[in-house]
Amino acid sequence: MGIHEKIKEIDFEMARTQKNKATEYHLGQLKARRAKLLTELQAPAKGSGGAGEGFDVQKYGDGRVALIGFPSVGKSTLLTVLTGTKSEAAAYEFTTLTCIPGVIHYNDAKIQLLDLPGIIEGAAQGKGRGRQVIAVCKSADLLLMVLDASKPHAHKEILSAELESVGIRLNRRPPGIYFKKRKTGGVSVSSTCPLTQIDDKMCQRVLAEYKIHNAELLFREDCTADDLIDVIEGNRRYISCLYVYNKVDVCSIEEVDTIARLPNAVPASAGTRLNMDGLLAGMWDKMALVRVYTKRVGGKPDFAEPVVLSQDRGGTAVEHLCQQIHKTLVADFSYALVWGRSSKHYPQRCGLTHVLQDEDVVQIVKKKVSASTDGRGRFKTKSDAPLKIADREKKAALKT
Ligand SMILES: Nc1nc2c(ncn2[C@@H]2O[C@H](COP(=O)(O)OP(=O)(O)OP(=O)(O)O)[C@@H](O)[C@H]2O)c(=O)[nH]1
Ligand SMILES: [K+]
Ligand SMILES: [Mg+2]
């Protein structure tokens, strides 16, 4: 029996099992079995390398945003409008067949936008170019799920379910569960809050499905069996998503108003350039990029080209700033002076762990390099330093 049939069989069994106290554990076990099969299904086919021909696009800029949606919802039109890179748009489905990259210049940052072929129900199981599209989505920092505002809103749920089934979690954080396998001692479950959706027995049944009989579990939230499965599987991608309801030019004012009130939703029309600013602003907020302006001793901050940090790409602490500037800077780091939203006083003297905020100005002070070392210290030759002091004394003597 193939994996698809096995999944279908489990779905059938889950559908016909009544939900009650007695079947609860059995259902939990089935969920785990299903999750395992889905993971198996995603394992790359033998011999295939990365995302596939036409989809291996190099990362560029400070963040990557992917356009995902059904065919002909206006993804390519949107790419062309936002980036100026032309991606063929037409009234027939599957106009786009590969991954087309463009760049958005916004708030001094460069954001890579990727146009992709339309995907359809069943994409997760390999329909159309589903697999390749999903692989690209997994590499993105933000997804723009493009929906046709004039079409049934159920499309959003169908697409979300497809992404869910390949381990992508939209607008969610990893569950607050500490999980560690042990050699002996059985399964120990503890929690820092009341658990209303899962108990010891359920944990044991789910773990047993993964042949784990010794483990420590600590719940920091009121989690479900699905959350536990996500943590055990460990391969989930937590990605932010904006729902772009395109083609609102053909909707009534009332419909646009309803859309605008939905969470994470942006009404827009790429064809008529409606609310492109709102879309860019929404994107910027979701990406939570942190622009840091560096400043040399005695100089002005470099406001032309910020170093852009993000939680999705490593982190936003001083340490991450140093790593982005130069690979040896962390080793040479003494302290940083920080002006801006993250500092309590101007400037604040900070260490490597200090978390920066958007538009902070930072001056990095390196450890004193001994004068005899190479050119990266303040003094090039041994004679430099004493000479400067002597100069200062000479000046002072002249003044008096
Ligand atoms: N009315 C209206 N039509 C639009 C809008 N944006 C795009 N279209 C039209 O919708 C059709 C599909 O646009 P595309 O940009 O090719 O859509 P796509 O999602 O890239 O399609 P595929 O690549 O085939 O998946 C084209 O005829 C566009 O002119 C819009 O805001 N309003
Ligand atoms: K199209
Ligand atoms: Mg297209």
Image: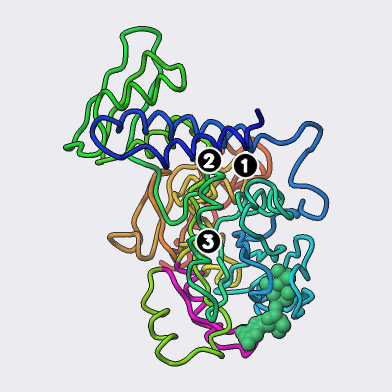
Q: Which residue is mark 2?
A: 330
Which residue is nearer to you in this view: 1 or 202? 1
Distance from disc 2 to disc 3, alpha carbons, whole Å, reads 15 Å
**SS state under label 2:** helix
Viewer can see residue 212: yes
Furthest residue toward top? 184
Q: Residues within 10 Å of mark 2 (few under 14, many from 20)?
A: some
What segment carries the magenta color? Answer: 264-285
Residue 14's tag is none
**Quadrant hosting residue 356:** bottom left
Q: Which residue is mark 1?
A: 327
The amino acid sitting under disc 3 is: Thr
Q: Which residue is mark 3?
A: 294
Q: Is residue 110 above or below residue 197?
A: below
Distance from disc 1 to disc 3, alpha carbons, whole Å, reads 16 Å
Mark 2–mark 1 CB contact (< 8 Å): yes
